[in-house]
Amino acid sequence: MAAPDTATKPLRADARRNRQRVLDAAARCFAKDGMQAQMDDIAGCAKVGVGTVYRHFPTKEALVRALADDYFARQDELARAALEVRDPWEAFSGYIRGGANLLAENRALAETAAERPDLMQAAAFAASTERGFFETLETLIERAQSAGVLRPDFQLEDIPSIMCSLGSLQISRGQYANWRRILEMLLDGLRAGARNELPPPGASLPHP
Amino acid sequence: MAAPDTATKPLRADARRNRQRVLDAAARCFAKDGMQAQMDDIAGCAKVGVGTVYRHFPTKEALVRALADDYFARQDELARAALEVRDPWEAFSGYIRGGANLLAENRALAETAAERPDLMQAAAFAASTERGFFETLETLIERAQSAGVLRPDFQLEDIPSIMCSLGSLQISRGQYANWRRILEMLLDGLRAGARNELPPPGASLPHP
DNA sequence: CACTATACGGAACTCCAACTCCGTTTGTCA
DNA sequence: TGACAAACGGAGTTGGAGTTCCGTATAGTG
């Protein structure tokens, strides 16, 4: 899936510059208006014709996808940075907070997470550098669980769900201003020792 | 805000029947396809012409609003029923579970909660019977907090946010199948005794 | 300084989904 | 049962947003 011919030829200088302007404009417009943002507006915002937008990104979806790639590259950075944090709970919860903040800044991606999880998932897998993004998350989870600070029944798949949940509170800028409170309450529920913990999913014994 | 002239004239028998068929069809279509559902499809599903749909509901939004009214009437019922439950935690958490299930059954309302909270709020206020819906929720919260089973910093406004969050996981039927797990973990975080509780919002002293 | 491939701009096109209109049908009531 | 207001059906209209097309402009090259 990695680009088979990334070296298809270096872009002309103006083309490279415009491509970036379009990306920046798209980020701004999508952050502000969500998927409502219109291609013409993005073009205008980038001070470029619509045609130029379409030369670089053949469809609106392709443009969103490009932003999603960028987003997951940052998520990946956050997760890696969290690996450096000593305290396993701070590492885990710090990543969750940071990731949620990142999503909170882009309304269109919050919408996409709810409506097109497939697209987000594809972008998430593409974000992998040498070590996969999800593997990094898995490590954060395992560390926190081994340290006994994260409930043992927490699973990797819970992370996208949590992000999507919190993201949905961002779609309507203004209402639901309390999303951080909700997140903190949820985090309290994720700590080991919360009432209704179940045994970890696939294991009946701890590591021998 | 209650209908000023509900008695504008009794509908003709066929009109009354068709109105109901449209509502039923809309409920089905919106539940299945979310806001993507098309007016023509709804008409077809109700075995009725589009014109008939529009005679009863002048816009798509009006149709959604009618469903939202119905939805909040049920939410109201749930909340009242919860008042009858002895155990204050069961009452509170039972309502939350029931309410989330209700929203989970209607994709379009889950989308609307995220995108048009204003519309949902209006419908929620309209749901009031003699006792307001939100007052009932407030009572559930206070009872649980007085009993020391719900964290004292939990607020009424957290309920719509929680519903919206969980609802967003329903928008893409299929992905995010773990929403009930997320809810249970969140509920664990809502119980009194969770780590990072803050003092209740407006009070520095308990009731004297 | 030509010359050409590459890129640009934005008017025009297309498609789709909400909504309208009007000729036809049907319930109601005297 | 006849008359008429109320309701119906669905082809057609409208508007809006994504996408295309092509004449013009410009970066890169010999």
Image: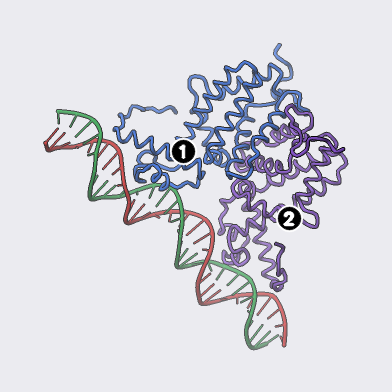
Chain colours: A blue, B purple, C red, D green
Q: Which mark is residue A27?
A: 1
The amino acid type, in three-letter code, at marker 2 is Ala
Q: Quadrant of residue A24?
A: top left
Q: How many marks?
A: 2
Circle 2: is it few (<14), some (14-19), or many (20+) Cα within 10 Å? many
Q: Horizontal and vertical percent for residue B81?
A: 82, 48
Is A173 or D16 nearer to us in this picture? A173
Report whether A63 appears left or right of B180: left
Same subunit, labels 1 and 2: the answer reads no
Q: Quadrant of residue A54?
A: top left
Instruction: Give the position of the C terminus of chain A as an image quadrant.
Output: top right
Residue shown at 81% from the left, 41% from the top: B142
Report whether B47 appears left or right of A43: right
Residue shown at 67% from the left, 42% from the top: B161
Q: Cα distance, mark 1 to mark 2?
A: 39 Å
Kind of element beneath mark 1: helix
Q: Which mark is residue B153?
A: none
Q: Horizontal and vertical percent for residue B54?
A: 59, 65
Is A140 or B17 nearer to us in this picture? A140
Kindly identify which chain the residue marked by label 1 belongs to.
Answer: A
Residue shown at 55% from the left, 35% from the top: A103
Q: Horizontal and vertical percent for residue A110?
A: 56, 39
Q: Which mark is residue B127?
A: 2
Q: Relative to residue C15, is residue B142 depicted above or below? A: above
Kindly identify which chain the residue marked by label 2 belongs to.
Answer: B
Q: Quadrant of residue B172?
A: top right
Q: Relative to residue B62, is residue A44 depicted above or below? A: above
The amino acid type, in three-letter code, at marker 1 is Ala
Circle 1: is it few (<14), some (14-19), or many (20+) Cα within 10 Å? many
Report whether B106 appears left or right of B143: left
